[in-house]
Image (cartoon, coloured by chain):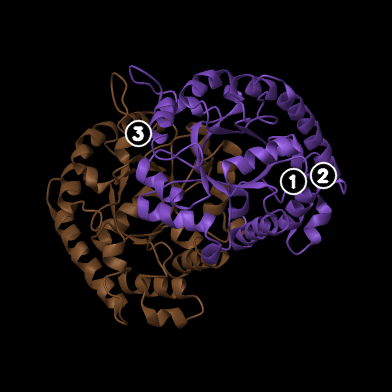
Chain colours: A brown, B purple
Amino acid sequence: MNRSALVKLIFTKKTFLCIGLDTDLSKIPQHLLEKEDPIFEFNKAIIDATNDLAIAYKPNFAFYECCGTKGWNSLTRTISYLNEKYADKVFTIADAKRGDIGNTSQQYAKAMFDPAASGMNFDAVTVAPYMGEDSVKPFLSYPGKWIIVLALTSNKGAADFQFFRNADHRLFEEVLLKSQLWGTNENMMYVVGATQAEMLSDIRKIVPNHFLLVPGVGAQGGSLQDVAKYGLTKDCGLIVNSSRNIIYASAGIDFDQKAREEAAKIQQEMEGILNIPCR
Amino acid sequence: MNRSALVKLIFTKKTFLCIGLDTDLSKIPQHLLEKEDPIFEFNKAIIDATNDLAIAYKPNFAFYECCGTKGWNSLTRTISYLNEKYADKVFTIADAKRGDIGNTSQQYAKAMFDPAASGMNFDAVTVAPYMGEDSVKPFLSYPGKWIIVLALTSNKGAADFQFFRNADHRLFEEVLLKSQLWGTNENMMYVVGATQAEMLSDIRKIVPNHFLLVPGVGAQGGSLQDVAKYGLTKDCGLIVNSSRNIIYASAGIDFDQKAREEAAKIQQEMEGILNIPCR
């Protein structure tokens, strides 16, 4: 999905919500555990109940890998379902935080973007920048696909290295400055945690037009209003993720409808933000 | 496997070789493609032919993920085979470069270290440090397991951020300094590329006793002698990886024997290094 299609989706649906599919067998409703593939059934129900309120879904790979081959199969079924039933209607993000030497990143890119090889066809993948340009570039060789580079993350540990600074600026700013040269704002986004909303002004000085994927609203404590205040661009430029608050809104038989209600609250707030004139 | 068992393995087998299982369907011998699970059959043959010459095996996750669920299954079969047939005789490394917020790293740790959940039981996992302490710590909660933190990698892109410096030192040194406080030299190692051998003296000043996993010997151009010269400790302190040079030594029916010959050359060189007195 290219940038203009993504922007169109945002303004048509009046939302920039991404729903994180951090699907955990120990947290999903009991009645699903009787199904053959509870993780997929849960995701399918969540997607069917919320797809008009969200523009993106983001399976978090760790939650599938911890279930081994069976989990990887649930993941593949989830992305296939999104591709088949909601083609062009949602943006799909492989939240995998990958990155390795060139020949290895090439294989990771195949995993995320080449359905003939892996059975998976995401629009975007999150990548870790520590290993530099040749660890990131292989992901950019797929036309129409995106990478989302970790810049400033939402967790406490972000302070350990991301704020390491030279005379001019901090590591996360160095990541923004350098990586911009590797791709364009048509195939690269950045992860910026909502818990770091006050940093968004600094970040927007370096990447005024790139889309930002913003996790950390909700369970992690970030505020949507702050994120919008400092991060919004003319064409929105934000994808804000919420996972646990939405998908685990209820552990009962009504879990999908309760998830819808939570997503609707956020969509309403987002619609208000998108309606503010003169952005 | 604890440190003393690992060291014993090294001095008993007279080798500190790790064989990287970067198993690529397009590079393995044609005759294996007829088998039901060519990747596993290839790995099994390589392991059976080389296990007395190597102390570790390191499946590179990207090469399995690119084949989707089928690839993940080959990976699980490979680690299960190592666990069953070569328990306590080889050290196993999940080369996955994982790292995410705490609740997510916890799931990645389960994937690598909890066979009841994932079917996989590695001794160690490579982790990316960019997201800091809480992204790394969940992996350390498994007794007897190891994390191997990326410090200075073997690729060209290592220069992009790992050399970013403050007034005192560079990012990779900051990673070594800070991460040391999170674990001990009984459960943490570091990745230091063989192509950066001349940096090993600086690194040994910060981490004199930690084991280092050293990729980049062979196809990537690093020298074993240089690595040993600057990196060796009294109890060896090095695990040196070679992948392509060994596993793709031949694409013929004799691939496993040719792999053995390549591994034997390296083992011989390592035996010489381990025999040098007064280390």
Position in image of residue B206 (x %, y %): 46, 24
Mark 1 belongs to which subunit? B
Whether the residues at callouts 2 and 1 have beta carbons within 8 Å, the answer is yes
Mark 3 belongs to which subunit? A
- Return the residue at label 1: B27
**Closer to us: B144 or A37:** B144
In this view, A28 is above or below B171: below
- Provide the secondary structure element on which disc 2 rests: loop
Q: Earlier in the sequence, mark 2 or mark 1?
A: 1
Whether discs 1 and 3 lie on one chain: the answer is no
- Provide the secondary structure element on which disc 1 rests: loop
- Return the residue at label 2: B251
Residue drawn 76% across and 31% down?
A: B266
Position in image of residue A83 (x %, y %): 47, 64
Position in image of residue A227 (x %, y %): 20, 47
Residue drawn 17% across and 64% down?
A: A268
Decide: few, some or many residues near mark 1? Use Cα within 10 Å; few <14, some 14-19, many ≥20: few
Q: Which mark is residue A161?
A: 3
In this view, A209 is above or below A83: above
